[in-house]
Image (cartoon, rainbow, N blue to C red):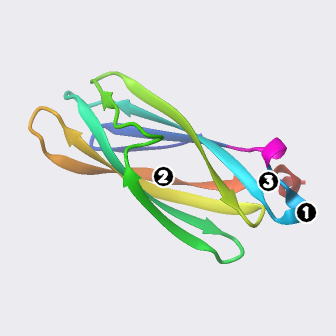
């Protein structure tokens, strides 16, 4: 698990290869990732948007931005956490991702950015 704390917000990432949804012979590799966002601050926050940088080892780079995560803009109270699972497809067996979330402090309405730590995605066959 990879973890980073920014302004009292902890972002943890666990990644996994989705063998049953991948087709290595067709250069199609699907990786899932579980994100846990924990509010260690003294104020409630709302996750407004996400911004991802996605790199495939064959040179494909993507940048993705959008509202919320998996169709939601969750509110996370102090001491609570929010977890979701998503996925990304790659043409090669190795990739990496990192990015940021835009959050809003619900007490003072100020928006701030929280880092999503860089994590690597490696198909199990590459680890042998």
Give percent across and percent down for residue 52: 47, 59
The picture quadrant where one finds residue 126 is: bottom right
The picture quadrant where one finds residue 43 is: top left
- Give left or right: position of 50 versus 122: left
The picture quadrant where one finds residue 73 is: top left
Give percent across and percent down for residue 63: 48, 67
Q: Quadrant of the C terminus?
A: bottom right
Tell me how many marks there are.
3
Residue 52 is tagged as none
Q: Residues within 10 Å of mark 2 (few under 14, many from 20)?
A: some
Vertical placement of residue 118 versus 14, above or below: below
Give percent across and percent down for residue 78: 27, 24
- Give left or right: position of 17 versus 83: right
Which of marks 1 and 2 precedes in the sequence? Answer: 1
Badge 2 element: strand
Q: Quadrant of the N terminus?
A: top right
Which of marks 3 and 1 precedes in the sequence? Answer: 1
Is 45 magenta? The answer is no
Q: Nearer the viewer, mark 2 or mark 1?
A: 1
Residue 25 is tagged as 1
Query: Which residue in the structure is indicated by mark 3?
Result: 123
* Residue at the limit of the structure toward the bottom, as seen here: 59
Q: Nearer the viewer, mark 3 or mark 2?
A: 3
From mark 1 to mark 3, how far is it between C-alphas? Answer: 13 Å
* Residue at figure coordinates x 50%, y 57% from the top left: 98
Vertical placement of residue 44 versus 66, above or below: above
* Residue at the limit of the structure toward the left, as seen here: 108
- Give left or right: position of 17 versus 100: right
Query: Which residue in the structure is indicated by mark 2?
Result: 117
Vertical placement of residue 58 versus 75, above or below: below
Badge 1 element: helix
- Tell me which segment is drawn in magenta: 16-21
């Amino acid at each position: 698990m990879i973890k980073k704390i920014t302004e009292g917000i902890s972002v943890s990432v666990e990644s996994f290869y989705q063998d049953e949804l991948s087709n290595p012979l067709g250069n199609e590799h699907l990786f899932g990732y579980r994100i846990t966002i924990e509010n260690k601050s003294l104020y409630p926050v709302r996750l407004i948007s996400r911004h991802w940088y996605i790199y495939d080892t064959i040179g494909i780079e993507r940048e993705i931005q959008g509202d919320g995560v998996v169709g939601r803009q969750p509110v996370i109270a102090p001491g609570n956490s929010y977890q979701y699972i998503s996925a990304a497809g790659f043409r090669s067996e190795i990739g990496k991702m990192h990015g940021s979330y835009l959050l809003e402090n619900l007490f003072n309405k100020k928006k701030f950015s929280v880092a999503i730590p860089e994590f690597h995605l490696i198909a199990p066959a590459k680890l042998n």
